[in-house]
Amino acid sequence: MDFRIIKSPSNSTKDILKKRMSKNSLRDLENADAIGLVQGKFIDMIYASDIAEKAVGVTVEDIRGTCPQHMVLISVLGDTSSVEAALNEIKLKMKEVGAI
C-alpha cells in the first residue's frame, strides 16, 4: 500500500484528477486544501475509504486508472489537517489487521 499527501495542489494536478474521477466530487476537489492518495488492493481501498470518512470530515473518491483489476487508487479530499489525520488513521487500522 502506498500513501502520498499533496498540500496546496496545483491546478494542473487537479485537472489530472478531474479526468479520472466522477463528476459528483468535483466541487470537493476544487475546495480541497490537500489531496491524500492511497493505492493498493481493492479490498484494502474499500476498507481505507470507510476508515477515512469515519475518522474525520473528508471526502473519499475512487480514481479510475489504467489497471483497475490489480491496483486501486483513492483520493482523500479536505483541509490539510483532516487529510493528514485520515491517512494516519488508515495506516493505524491497516497495521492492526496486518495489511501493512
Image (cartoon, grey):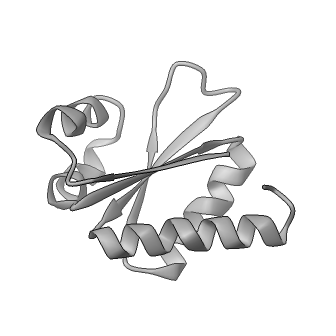
Q: Nearer the viewer, residue 5 or 74?
A: 5
* Side of 30 where 67 appears, left or right: right
The image quarter in which residue 12 lies: top left
Residue 70 to residue 66: above or below: below
Image quarter hosting the N terminus: top right
Image quarter hosting the C terminus: bottom right
Q: Position of residue 66 (x, y in %)?
A: 52, 19
Residue shown at the point (60%, 37%) measured from the top left: 72
Q: Position of residue 14 (x, y in %)?
A: 22, 40
Residue 53 to residue 7: above or below: below
Q: Position of residue 67 (x, y in %)?
A: 60, 21
Residue shown at the point (67%, 61%) measured from the top left: 47
Q: Position of residue 63 (x, y in %)?
A: 44, 38
The image quarter in which residue 23 lies: top left
* Side of 59 where 24 appears, left or right: left
- In the displayed orientation, state which residue is furthest to the top: 66
* Side of 49 where 98 appears, left or right: right
The image quarter in which residue 20 lies: top left
Residue 66 to residue 49: above or below: above
Residue shown at the point (28%, 51%) measured from the top left: 24
* Side of 6 where 93 appears, left or right: right
The mark tally for this picture is 0
